[in-house]
Image (cartoon, helix red, strand yellow):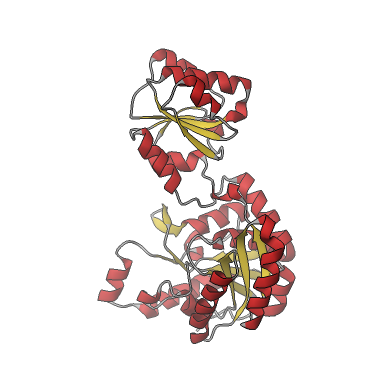
Amino acid sequence: MLLNATTPRIFVAATRQNDGKTTTSLGLLSALERRYGRVGYIKPVGQRFVEIDEQKIDEDSVLMDKVFRLNCPLVDMSPIAVEPDFTRRYLQNANLDWLVKRIHKAFDRVAWEKQFVLIEGTGHAGVGSVFDLSNAAVARLLGSKVVIVSRGGIGLPIDEVAMNRALFAAEGVEVIGVILNKVLPEKLEYITEFAQRGLKRKGLELLGVIPHQPILSKPTLDLIREELRAEVLAGGPRIHNIVQRVVIGAMGPANVTRLFQPATLLICPADREDVLLAASEATAKDETQLAGVILSDDIQPSPSMRRLVAAFPCPVLITRADSYSVASAVHDLTVKTRPDDTQKIRLIRDMISRHVNLDRILERIA
C-alpha cells in the first residue's frame, strides 16, 4: 500500500524520448515551488544515470536536486536505475514486489513535509513494460493523474497521445491533458487552435503550447568535452559556452574566418597554425565569434602555439579523435539540460510560466 495518499502530485509523461519531458518538468517544478514553497520530485524509473557515493542516480534527479535544493536523499528521488543488465536479471528472477515497495517507500520520503510532488516518467507510456513497471503502471502505483508532453504539430502528436492515453487507461490512470513542445513560433497560434480542436474530440485538454527554442538543443563545451573525453588546455572558466555552429578548419585562414559567427566551435589539428592564428586575430576583434576551439588528431601544439591558445578568450580543448569524428560526435549528441546550464534553465522557467496553464493543471488534479 502507498503510505502517502494525500500529498498532491502529477505524473509528467511523454509520447517518446527527447520530446521535452525533462524541460517541462523543470519548468513546472519551478512554477510549483513559487506556488507552494515546499515541493518534491521523483523519477521512479531512470535509464540514464550517474554514480554518486556508489549509488546509481538518474541524471534528471541530479539536475532537479541541484537546481531546486529539494532537501531529499538522491537515492529516494531515483529509486530504480535501469542498468545494462537490469532487464535480463529481472526476466531470470522477477522481483516486482520488491521494486514496488522500493518505489512506494521512496515516494513517501520524497513527499515528507512537501506540499506537492512532481513525478517524472521515462519515455512513452509503455517504457518499462518488460519488467512490469511501465510508466502507466508506475502512475497507477503512485495514485497520480498524468500530463502528456508531445512534440509540436497536429496530426502526429494527437495520434501518439491517443495511443499513450490508451495504455494509461488500461491501468486505470487518468490523463488530464497535453502539453505540446517545440512548436515553431510562427505557427504557435495555428497549432494552438487546431490541436485544441483535435484533442477536444478525444476528450482531452490542451494545457500548454511551448515555442521551439533552438538554444535548448545546442550543446555546451563542457558536454562536448565530456563526450570526447577531451583535455582543457585553456579557457576553463568559460567551459559552459553554448555551441551554435561547427566549423572544421580544413581550408585556408581567409576562408575559415569568413565562416565564423557568434558561438561557433572551431575544429582543427594543432599543426594548422595558420588557422589558429587567424582565429586568434578574429576573437581579438570580437570575443563572441568563437564558443571554443577543439584541437583534433591528438597533435600537441608547439610551445608558441601553447602561448597563443592560452590567450584565447574561449575554451581550447584537445582530443585524440580526428576532425570529422569530432564534428560527427557534436552533431549526434543528445543534449540534456545540466545543472550548470544557467542560461538555459532561466529560459525554461520563463517559457513554462508563460506558456503552460498551471492553474488548470491544479484544478484538474484537485
Residue 86 lies in quadrant: bottom left
Q: Position of residue 69 (x, y in %)?
A: 61, 55
Q: Position of residue 149 (x, y in %)?
A: 58, 68
The residue lying toward the viewer, choosing from 117 and 131, is 131
**Considering only vertical position in the picture, is 274 above or below 56?**
above
Q: Is residue 306 visible?
A: no
Say which residue appears at 65% left-offset and 70% top-offset.
116
Q: How many marks?
A: 0
The residue lying toward the viewer, choosing from 55 and 340, is 340
Q: Is residue 342 visible?
A: yes
Q: Position of residue 52 (x, y in %)?
A: 43, 53
The residue lying toward the viewer, choosing from 199 and 77, is 199
**Considering only vertical position in the picture, is 293 above or below 154?**
above
Say which residue appears at 54% left-offset and 50% top-offset.
217
Q: Residue furthest top?
A: 304
Say which residue appears at 65% left-offset and 63% top-offset.
28
Q: Quadrant of the C terminus?
A: bottom right
Q: Position of residue 201 (x, y in %)?
A: 64, 82
Say which residue appears at 62% left-offset and 60% top-offset.
183
**Considering only vertical position in the picture, is 88 above or below 225?**
below
Residue 94 lies in quadrant: bottom left
Relative placement, left or right, of 363 versus 170 is right
